[in-house]
Amino acid sequence: MPVPHIASLRYLTLVAGICWLGAGRLLAADPKTIAETRRLGSGLGLFFDDDLIASMDGAALRLHSPVPRGVVFNFDAPWEGGLSAYISIHKVGEKYRMYYRGGGDLVREYTCLAFSDDAVHWTRPKLGLIEFEGSKDNNIIWTGPRKAYDESHNFSPFKDLNPAATPEHAWKAVTVSRRGEGDRRKNVLMGFVSADGIHWKRLRDEPLITEGAFDSHNVVFWDVVQKQYVCYLRAGQQGKKSIARCTSKDFLDWTKPELLDFGGTPIEHFYTNGIVQYYRQPEVYVGLPMRFIHPTQRNTIGFEKRKTDGLSDAVFMSSHDGQHWNRAFMEAFLRPGPDPKNWGGAHGNTTPSWGIVQTSDTEISLFWAEHYDNYPAKELIPRLIRGTVRIDGFVSVNAPYAGGEFVTKPLTFSGKRLVLNCATSAPGSIRVEIQDAAGKPLPGYTLSDAVEFWGDEIERVVDFKNGPDVSALAVKPIRLRFVMKDADIYAIRFRP
């Protein structure tokens, strides 16, 4: 799906001397208003955090976990097995691709590729590229020189959205490689390129990045807002597995990795990162890390105790710049659930795949791995679960039956109609008031002028007694007040 250009939601970099034209006169801009104002334009205003919110009364942010839709893939081919992991999901045109690691224990590690028309039914193409046990009738696209931790341990491809990317390098990938022997052995991150995402070659013999652990799912993409490549990689922070970020203008020369800032929240073991730009608003970044609970904290349930014992689930986090992250929700986004096989396997269960794809007009699909088998008996076969969330529906502003409301920070917009991604119960409702930057209701758009509505829509047009046209208010900052009952608002946008 193409990524639209959307106006920034970051702080306006205005000077105190700027004035706003309104009501036939120049109004001096208040410095506090300038600092708080968000430039929404015609872009999407999300509530993944409280960046747009000035105040809430009886309302609160609510995290929405995905609805499990069932098993869509079993990693049971002879070249796959119990340690299959590090899954990437991409939508290419109207088709879907899944890249993943097979092998890693009883057989060497392989990079594999599966295809789907609907992200539900997956097939292994017979690509004829890499031999396994005397045959090339398989879906293997790469394997490294060594059995493990060498080029196929965590091969992570992406379709390059850089307009300057050449056709021969339309796809790129990063993967760990181990250089040296014994005490001098070191993990480095290598670069790969491809014209079609199937036939790959090393970009060069030298590594792209040398500072980092790289032993988990490192991801790279072209940041369509910042106009640079961004890599999120495995690093350490306060003695725990964590995430670092570095950037490059050309995919060749990279900045020094910098640990992510989690805003003063407790540092936890993040085994993966799952970071993407949200496709409907690429200035917002979403991360779905797998959270590892170390065996010094918790043991597995019903499995033999081992050195790599522990538990895992997944969390949700968001960012507006990719470096500083909001962890408003310390609770799990994905729980292990009632399946006893998800309470073992240590660091390989409930692991989100990298990639979020829209699979209907109303839903997003995301995927996670279960039944990771890091046990000697090799009784488990990993599998891929598909889950869905509402479009924009990771987080909402929720009001209970008793009612609640919230007011936005001052914002500027372009457009004619305000639309909401929202849902109510049968007795629930939503009303909207438009205020000036100081919080004073504007004539014709007060709460008494608002048309109360209820229902469940991705784009519900907000109406007033005199009609839905709000274009006359686009000349200066406004605030939006939402008065709700048993309702959720997921996103706002102004449409022509």
Image (cartoon, helix red, strand yellow):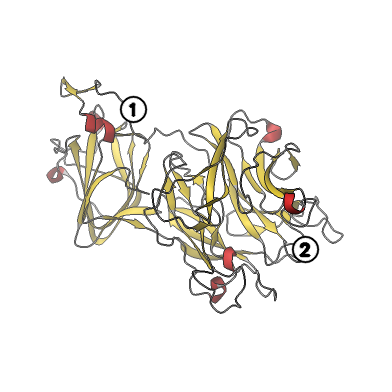
Mark 2 and mark 1 lie on one chain; the one further toward the N terminus is 1
In the picture, which quadrant includes the C terminus? top left
Which amino acid, mark 2?
A: Val
Q: Residues within 10 Å of mark 2 (few under 14, many from 20)?
A: some
Pointer 1 local density, CA inside 10 Å: few below 14, some 14–19, many at least 20: few
Looking at the image, residue 462 sits to the left or right of residue 296; the answer is left
Q: Nearer the viewer, residue 3 or 495?
A: 3
Amino acid at circle 1? Thr
Seen from the viewer's position, the closer of residues 47 and 494 is 47
Which quarter of the figure has residue 134?
A: bottom right
Q: Position of residue 54 (x, y in %)?
A: 24, 44
CA distance separating discs 2 and 1: 56 Å
Is residue 310 visible in this depiction of the protein?
yes
Location of residue 78 (image quadrant): bottom right
Mark linked to residue 76: none
Could you say whether the residue bearing mark 1 is in a helix, strand or loop? loop
Circles 2 and 1, Cβ within 8 Å, touching? The answer is no
Outermost residue to the right:
134
Q: Position of residue 409 (x, y in %)?
A: 25, 40
The structure residue drawn at horizontal position 70% and vertical position 48%, both measured from the top left corner, is: 186
Residue at image mark 2: 107
Q: Is residue 347 above or below residue 61?
A: below
Quick check: 127 left or right of 387?
right
The answer to which quarter of the image holds residue 331 is bottom left
Q: Residue at x 71, y 57 (%)?
A: 124
Q: Report x, y in % for residue 52.
A: 30, 42
Q: Which residue, given by chain and number where applicable, does mark 1 sit on?
A: 13
User: Residue 362, can we see it?
Assistant: no
In this image, 220 relative to 182: left or right?
left
414 over 317 or under it: above or below: above
